[in-house]
Image (cartoon, rainbow, N blue to C red):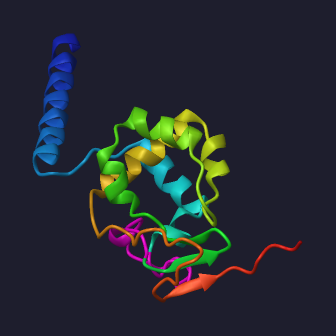
Amino acid sequence: MKQGPRNAAIAIAAAVCLAVTAGASFAAGKKPRGESHARGRYLVEIGGCNDCHTPGYAMSGGKVDEAKWLTGDSLGWRGPWGTTYPVNLRLYMQALSEKEWVDKARHLTARPPMPFWALNRMTDSDLRAIYRFVHTLGPAGAAAPQYVPPNQEPKPPYVTFPAPPK
């Protein structure tokens, strides 16, 4: 009994089914998710990105629906540098290509409390994984408030950092 052609036919049928399923998911607006997506999600969680860039995340012990992740926040961070606000990464990263994101993250400098040096030190692979994860979330939310210089009073709410010791 020859099973070579039969096995080949089964393999082809399985491949066609997988292709049709993948195509239907893509057509339905579902973005493919894989190892890079999972890695990006993991890095966003352990890197503390949500702590500032997701409203209510830190105060709720991380219990915020993923649909609201990385949408920026109106809670300001005030110190000698002025008042900064966590940018809406879901809107910001939509305007960048993956290569542009990696280049920006690699050379980023930012005002406190953003730990830009952590992004600077990430591998290209990790930065690409973060980019891909954020892109699967899609655009959502509104832009964060603009930076307020040190000589101007920001609108509440904001957290005041003490001046560094002299």
Q: Is residue 28 above or below residue 5?
A: below
**Where is the N terminus found, in terms of image quarters?**
top left
Residue 4 image-quadrant placement: top left
Residue 1 visible in image = no
Residue 9 visible in image = yes
Asked if residue 16 lies left or right of residue 45, the reply is left
120 inside magenta stretch = no
Residue farthest right in this picture: 166
Residue 5 drawn at (x, y percent): 16, 12
Residue 23 drawn at (x, y percent): 13, 39
Q: Residue at x 14, y 20 (%)?
A: 9
Q: Is residue 108 above or below residue 138?
A: above
Asked if residue 53 lies left or right of residue 58, the reply is left
Residue 70 drawn at (x, y percent): 42, 65
Q: Overall secondary structure of the magenta stretch?
A: loop
Residue farthest front in this picture: 151
Residue 73 image-quadrant placement: bottom left
Range shown magenta: 55-73
Residue 46 drawn at (x, y percent): 60, 60
Q: Residue at x 36, y 50 (%)?
A: 93
**Where is the C terminus found, in terms of image quarters?**
bottom right
Q: In front here: 84 or 59?
A: 84
Q: Is residue 97 above or below residue 73?
A: above
Residue 12 image-quadrant placement: top left
